[in-house]
Amino acid sequence: MQNTKVCPKCGSKDIVVVPGTIGWPGSGNYIQLRPSFVFKAVKVTRYLCCDCGFIEEWVDDLEDRVKIKNKYGGG
Ligand SMILES: [Zn+2]
């Protein structure tokens, strides 16, 4: 969906990209890396199919994915 711009559920090309945001705890779309330190969080981009409502989430930045792996990867 991120690369093809086609919904894998219904085949629609009506895809909207919703950029990740970081807000106070409870707002925005992100993965937290440190408790109580929301600005160390990683943004998560969402891809929404406007036809069927399917939503996909991606961490676009490789550096951010490494941070998450270091925190949650268990090794
Ligand atoms: Zn769809």
Image (cartoon, rainbow, N blue to C red):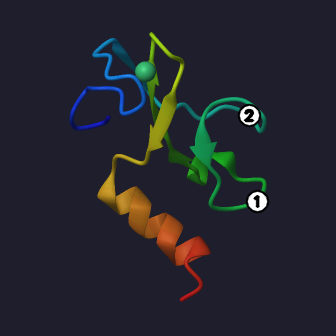
Q: Secondary structure at mark 2?
A: loop
Relative placement, left or right, of 66 versus 31 is: left
Q: Earlier in the sequence, mark 2 or mark 1?
A: 2
Q: Quadrant of residue 23?
A: top right
Q: Identify the residue at image location x=49%, y=72%.
A: 69
> Residue 21 location in percent, x, y?
54, 31
Seen in the picture, residue 75 relative to 14 is either above or below; the reply is below
Local packing at callout 2 (Cα closer than 10 Å; few below 14, some 14-19, many 20+) is: few
Real-space Cα separation, disc 2 to disc 1, in angstroms: 12 Å
What is the total number of numbered labels drawn onto the structure image? 2
Q: Quadrant of ligand 1?
A: top left
Dot label at residue 35: 1
Dot label at residue 24: 2
The amino acid at mark 1 is Pro
View extreme (bottom): residue: 75
Front residue of 24 and 55: 55
Relative placement, left or right, of 37 versus 71 is: right
Q: Identify the residue at image location x=31%, y=23%.
A: 11
Relative placement, left or right, of 65 versus 35 is: left
Q: Identify the residue at image location x=48%, y=40%.
A: 57
Q: Secondary structure at mark 1?
A: loop
The amino acid at mark 2 is Trp
> Residue 49 location in percent, x, y?
43, 19
Q: Identify the residue at image location x=35%, y=27%.
A: 7
> Residue 41 location in percent, x, y?
58, 50
View extreme (left): residue: 4
Q: Quadrant of residue 10?
A: top left
